[in-house]
Image: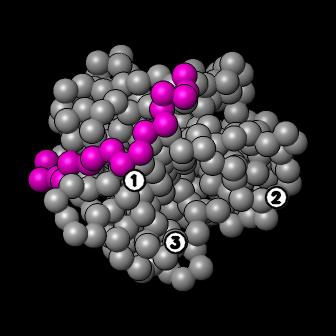
Amino acid sequence: MPLSRSRFEAFVARKTREAAQPLRRLVTVEDRSAHTSLQRIGNPWTREWYGGDFHLAAAPEDRPAISLVFVQSRDGNTGASNPDRLGGGPADKHLIYEGLSRVAADAVMAGAATVAGKDLFFSVWREEIVELRRDLGLPRHPTQIVVSQDGNVDLDGTLLFNVPEVPVIVLAGPACRDRCERTLTRRPWISVVPLASRNLEAAMPRLKRDFGISRISCVGGRATATSLLDAGLVQDLCLTTAARPGGEPGTPFYIGARPPALSLIVRKQEMDVDEPAIFEHFLVRRRQRPDLGDGDAAD
């Protein structure tokens, strides 16, 4: 059964309170956006604190545009029991991760292991970024997308499955459908989109055609991100690198055999700090022949 409404309201109040904390401004170190045709978005507050407009990659005609969003330690690790411990800082969390990287997204996507049994619900929380999302004509909260091959999902304990006014889409492999489809469909706000042979590419046109999703922010984990990259489905990458080492060793954001080719859009860093976090926004160059079989489509 859905979790109590009061639990979601308490979650929203906490996230809104946390997002209001002081931030450090970002200053632009390198800007190559003039060589692109990217869409620019922002309002006076975001432009002041981000140091200019934020850029959106164009969506393909037949499927959503997908952005990957990661924070990594200085030594390149993205795995941590609490992502805050990677050291991205408040500007990364509230301005980038829970802010500009998803303010224009129709949906936020994560692998099943990333969300299982947690007080997680993906949205924007800073008042000025909520206002920008409203100005873009988007619903208050993005659709929640969860990728699961084996059906290892905790429907009762995971917050995002239990907010009836916000749609959820489960991209479900055969084992997930066998194990969970009947239970999932008891929640009418949850839709199941089949995955075949770990192939995320086949599901993308349906997300755009049947659900009107033109832009997805993918927040993890590494296996889902790798599958999307290997399938040639990713348009851009938002990557924050902390000033200190840490995280679980050997946990880069890409774990496949063919690292993506990246083109820098902008590089920024925190102001007024001796060892600043670095934010980089990259375009991902599409491969000529995607290797659809590599990687796992769920965490």
Q: Quadrant of the C terminus?
A: bottom right
Distance of label 2 from label 1 (alpha carbons): 28 Å
User: Quick one: 90 or 171, which is closer to the camera?
Assistant: 90
* Residue 40 sits inside the magenta stretch: no
Q: Residues within 10 Å of mark 1 (few under 14, many from 20)?
A: many
User: Is 216 situated above or below 297?
Assistant: above
Query: Quick check: can you spot residue 2?
Result: no
Q: Secondary structure at mark 2?
A: loop
> Which amino acid lies under the numbered mark 2 shown in the image of this protein?
Asp
Q: Is residue 42 left or right of residue 75?
A: left
Q: Residues within 10 Å of mark 2 (few under 14, many from 20)?
A: some
Distance of label 3 from label 1 (alpha carbons): 13 Å
Q: Residue at x 41, y 45 (%)?
A: 30
> Which amino acid lies under the numbered mark 1 shown in the image of this protein?
Phe
User: Is 229 situated above or below 192?
Assistant: below
Distance of label 2 from label 3 (alpha carbons): 22 Å
User: Quick one: 16 or 173, which is closer to the camera?
Assistant: 16
* Residue 24 sits inside the magenta stretch: yes
Q: Secondary structure at mark 1?
A: strand
The residue that label 1 is drawn on is 279
Q: Position of residue 150 (x, y in %)?
A: 71, 61
**Which numbered tag is attached to residue 76?**
3
User: Is 245 situated above or below 173?
Assistant: below
**Based on the displayed image, in which of its 4 quarters is residue 209 positioned?**
top right
> Which amino acid lies under the numbered mark 3 shown in the image of this protein?
Gly
Q: Which residues are magenta?
A: 19-37
Q: Position of residue 7 (x, y in %)?
A: 25, 52
The residue that label 2 is drawn on is 294
User: Is 37 situated above or below 200?
Assistant: above
Q: Residue at x 59, y 40 (%)?
A: 283
Query: Quick check: can you spot residue 231?
Result: yes
